[in-house]
Structure formats: C-alpha cells, structure tokens
Image: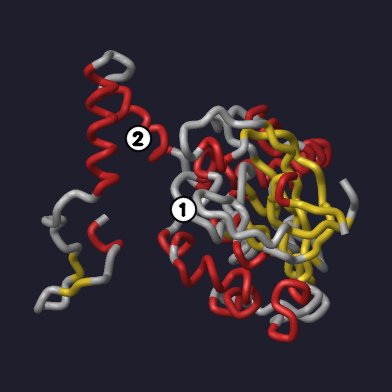
Amino acid sequence: MAEAVRVKAMMPPGHVRVPAYLRGKVGVIERQLREFGNPEQLAYGLKPQQQMLYRVRFTMEEIWGARAENPGDTLDAEIYEHWLEEV
Amino acid sequence: MPHDHHDHLSPSGHPFRQDNDGALTYWQRMEIAVRELMIEKGHTTAEDVARQIDIMDARSPANGAAVVARAWVDEGFKAELLQDAAGASRAMGFDIGPLNLLAVENTEHVHNLIVCTLCSCYPRNLLGLPPDWYKTRAYRSRAVIEPRAVLREFGLDLGADVQVRVHDSTADMRYIVLPARPEGTDSMDEADLAKLVTRDSMIGTGVPLTP
C-alpha cells in the first residue's frame, strides 16, 4: 500500500464504516493494523471476507479546506483496504 | 441515579425521568425475542445475562487510570502499552474480552482526542460505559470539525504550539489517551498517581488532575 492514499469517493447503500466526510480525501497511512472481517458483509450475516485495516491520517485542511479550525491539526481514522486507492 | 437526567423538572423543580410508557421499538422487540429464544434453547440463561450486565457495570475509568499510572512509573510497560495496549491491559489483570485497544500518547506538543462519529465506539471493556455526552451528535460531529472549540468548553485551551490529533473510531480499534504525567508528581507512587487520572483525560477532553 502506497504511503499516500485517497479514500474512494463512492456512496454505496447499506452498512459502511467509512464516514462520508472522509470520502474522496487524501491522507497518509499512519500504520497498518491487521485483517478483520469486512463489516459490510458482517452487518448482513454474510460470511465476511478478510480485509486489511489501515489507520489513515488526514490534515484538517485536507478535510475541511478553508473552513478548517486549525489546518495543521490531524484526524486519524481506520479505513479498510478496499476503500483506499493509491495517489 | 435519579439525578442523572435533567430533561424534565417536576412543578417543584425536582428533576425526573419520564416513564417509558411508549410502545417498544423494532429493535427492542428484536432484542427481547432473540434473548428469550436463546434462553429457551439453552444457549444462555437469564442469570448469565444479569451477570454480564454486572461485569460491565463493575468496569470503570479506575481500570484505565491504573494502566496510565503504571505507564507513568514504568518505561518498559509504557513501551508495551504503546505497542499493544490490549496486551498490556490484560497483563495487568484486566478482563477486557476481545477488545482491540490502541493507546495514543499526549506530549508537550501533541494532544489526542477520541471520538466515534459513526456511533458510540468506546473502550467499554476497560473504562466501562461512556458518558452520555460522548454519544451525542453534537460531540460526535463537533469533535472532528472544531476540536479546539470543544476542548475549550471542557476547560482546555490549547496553544498554537500543540497539535490536536483527533482519532475517529471508525472500525475495529478502540482508543485510550495516555495523558502526560503532570508536573510536580515525582515523589508520588503508582496508586496515588492513578487518582489523578480522570475519565476525560483518557478520552482527551481533559488532562489529569494536579496534586
């Protein structure tokens, strides 16, 4: 996985653990966690595929643009591999 | 505790909680149905359910405070905590079940804040149940949009030389802040140090007490 990643800007229906405010935003991998069952399948009682989970760090400037309270502050979120694309 | 909810006041000004006379919601009916079926089929018992509730109620921020105080006095333990917070907590004897815990360290120039914007993820198996405000939409949305303004409302005014790092518990990890050890505590032992560690200091909406 590349160091800089973009959260895919897709809006699928159903149970998704990627907050809408991060979709389409670019961050850097803070650390790789480990594989977990995909919650988008678990939520519906389906047999889950294992998905690698990463912690991705975004700047507040990247997320909120000119509205950022303090551009250099950061936000970390856990994002599954299938939601990330290399930048 | 009858005074936890101040939504309603009696004519005499006494706060009370409204009677829950409304119809059961879909999910309340679902919970009752699943629980009764599992008891009927012998998978669990009413006593087991009550015992699990007791175990959860017995968990409190004091557990996390003990972990933090140990990290303050023991560099080796601190390194272990930052590497694998769940393992370090279990090694201290805390039954945290399957909790995936990650500790984030506050320093002179970094202040961490924990939130769950999607729901109310919280390290319950270590710290017990979250405070009511942690689950509100106001906290969950404002903590990521204007964390510094939120912190000011909690009485914490951070300078420009401190970077705020917000952690949104979006998936499988839960978080605890390892607050910085307060000044003037060099002579204190682990047990007394633990008394300085507040719940909010482990969420990041506060800092430890000073002696």
Which x, y percent locates residue B105? Answer: 76, 54
Decide if residue B142 is in sight here.
Answer: yes
Chain letter of mark 2 equals: B
Which x, y percent locates residue B32? Answer: 23, 35
Question: In the image, what residue type sits under mark 2?
Answer: Ile
Q: Please name the residue shown 27% across and 29% down the image.
A: B35
Question: In the image, what residue type sits under mark 1?
Answer: Pro
Sequence-earlier tag: 1 or 2: 2
Establish if B57 lies above or below B166. above
Q: Please name the residue shown 78% across and 69% down the image.
A: A59
Where is mark 2, residue-wise? B53
Establish if B90 lies above or below A27. above
Chain letter of mark 1 equals: B
Establish if B77 lies above or below B174. above
Q: The N terminus of chain B is located in which quarter?
A: bottom left
Disc 1 is placed on an element classified as loop
Q: Is residue A26 left or right of residue B7?
A: right
Q: Please name the residue shown 74% across and 35% down the image.
A: A34
Q: Please name the residue shown 65% across and 41% down the image.
A: B101
Q: Is residue B27 left or right of residue A13?
A: left
The crowd level at tag 2 (other Cα within 10 Å; few <14, some 14-19, many 20+) is few
Front-most of residues B25 and B50: B25
Which x, y percent locates residue B22? Answer: 14, 57
Front-most of residues A67 and B181: A67
> Residue B190: which quarter of the image?
top right
Which mark is on residue A76?
A: none
Where is mark 1, residue-wise? B130
Which x, y percent locates residue B86? Answer: 66, 35
Front-most of residues B193 and B163: B163
